[in-house]
Amino acid sequence: MTRILRPLVRLLIHYQVSFPFINQRLKVLYLDVADAEFEPVQGRRTDSRLSFLTGVHRKDVRRYREDQHSFLSEDRKSVSMAAHVIATWMSVPPYCDGQGQPQDLYRSRAQGEPSFEDLVDAISRQDMRARAVYDELLSNHTIIELPLERVALNIQAYIPNENFAAKADFFARALTEHLAAGAHNLRGESPAWLERGVYANNLTSAQISQLHSFAVQRSQVLLREINQKAKQLQKQNEGGQESLYKFHYGVFFNAQSQAKNSNE
């Protein structure tokens, strides 16, 4: 589990998605999966049974079943400090102007107002030092240092590009299907789904580039052939009543330094 989640956690931290947010979402997911996919042998789906299956406290199970919308809305309280700071900077005077554009701020209240220090303190109630938030936003280029001890919000660095939603959807779909196939095989269900890989080490950067180009070229041919076969089979089923299945086939290529964390 740790090996599987490590790259995802790195991605979440990169996009400033905090642990409390994920913790709440995971709790909801445990309850949702247990409630929807684990049928009781006899009796009914009780709060006690869901609590037993998931380890989630019965009071949370009860709240989840009584009002799922309210339970899910608690996520908003757990977004990261950085996200709170940026959202406030872009929407709340005096940190933004009348058109909703973020103002340049002084780094500290001792230098002038409005200040970045005031902004952080107003959100965190002084539970987190403004310097820690400042250093993190500076390191990922979300803020830009200006002359005279002032700082500006780099909106372009914070807002994902226009292709982000499509990329995220493809990423989620591909990983979901791969994990589902692997879990199917680990459970020993039959027939086992295709899940193969090729590995090699002690290669140069130039050789990795050569292999990547070769893999892209060959996979394009295979993907096109599989897609054509699927279209042919779909035509055979037009008007049929048993066309209830879908499939997903994909390929990927990843390379990294052998000195990188061996947990991956």
Image (cartoon, helix red, strand yellow):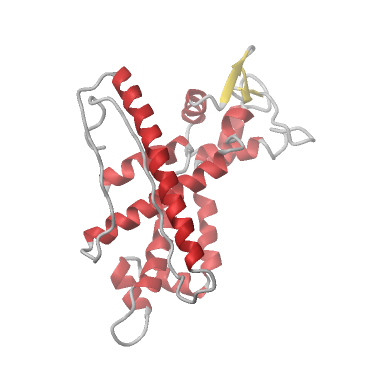
Horizontal arrangement in the rendering, residue 16 relative to residue 222 (left or right) = right
x, y (%) of residue 163? 58, 38
x, y (%) of residue 215? 35, 33
Q: Which residue: 41% across, 45% down?
A: 223
Q: Which residue: 41% across, 71% down?
A: 61
* Closest to the observer, 114 or 182: 182
Give the residue at the far top of this rendering. 147
* Closest to the observer, 220 or 248: 220
x, y (%) of residue 105? 65, 24
Could one spot residue 120 in this view of the protein? Answer: yes
Q: Which residue: 24% across, 59% down?
A: 185
Image quadrant holding the C terminus, namely top left
Horizontal arrangement in the rendering, residue 224 relative to residue 121 (left or right) = left
Give the residue at the far bottom of this rendering. 43
Residue 32 picture quarter: bottom left
Question: How many marks overall?
Answer: 0
* Closest to the observer, 198 or 228: 228
x, y (%) of residue 188? 20, 63
Q: Which residue: 72% across, 33% down?
A: 96
Q: Is residue 250 above or below residue 185?
A: above
Residue 204 picture quarter: top left
Could one spot residue 79 in this view of the protein? Answer: no
* Closest to the observer, 84 or 193: 193
